[in-house]
Amino acid sequence: MATNYTADGTYWTGRVRDNGNLEVVRLRSDGYVTVQSIGSYIKHGSAVAAAAQLAYAQGQADARAELSAAIFTSLAGVGISPVTVEAPDEEPDPQD
């Protein structure tokens, strides 16, 4: 069974194409379906660096989302919920 490297069950990797270049792709762990393709690189080091950077950026986004959800859950646990502020119905008078 494949490992989920990101919260959405995908991971970044490289795949050798017919021309010998390495294509950077995001695959779904269950079935290895291509979710996203970024580009093709001649140098394998460039492809590895691109895949690593994309995985890191996605990991950061996943961590932020989890942290945000944890904060809201903790606040709700002590009885504090987000407050919705509605915009005024009309534009303010520019002379005020």
Image (tube, rainbow, N blue to C red):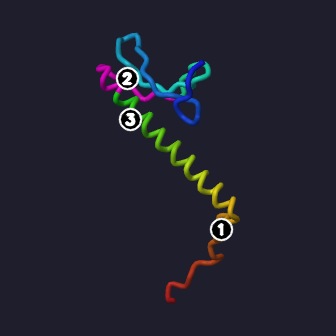
- Specify the amino acid type for callout 1: Val
Mark earlier in primary sequence (1, 2):
2
Q: Disc 3 versus disc 1: distance between alpha carbons? A: 36 Å
- Mark 3 lies on a secondary structure that is helix
Identified at 64% across, 71% down, the residue is 85
- Mark 1 lies on a secondary structure that is loop
- Specify the amino acid type for callout 2: Ser
- Mark 2 lies on a secondary structure that is strand
Farthest residue to the top: give it: 18
- Specify the amino acid type for callout 3: Gln
Mark earlier in primary sequence (3, 1):
3
Identified at 57% across, 24% down, the residue is 29
Question: Which residue is identified by label 2?
Answer: 40
Image position, residue 86 (x, y; %): 65, 71
Image position, residue 90 (x, y; %): 62, 78
- Compared to residue 29, the image places residue 91 above or below, namely below
Identified at 35% across, 16% down, the residue is 21
Give the residues drawn in magenta, as a range: 36-48
Image position, residue 28 (x, y; %): 57, 25
Question: Which residue is identified by label 1?
Answer: 83
Classify residue 73 as left or right of residue 56. right
- Foreground mark, 3 or 2, reads 3
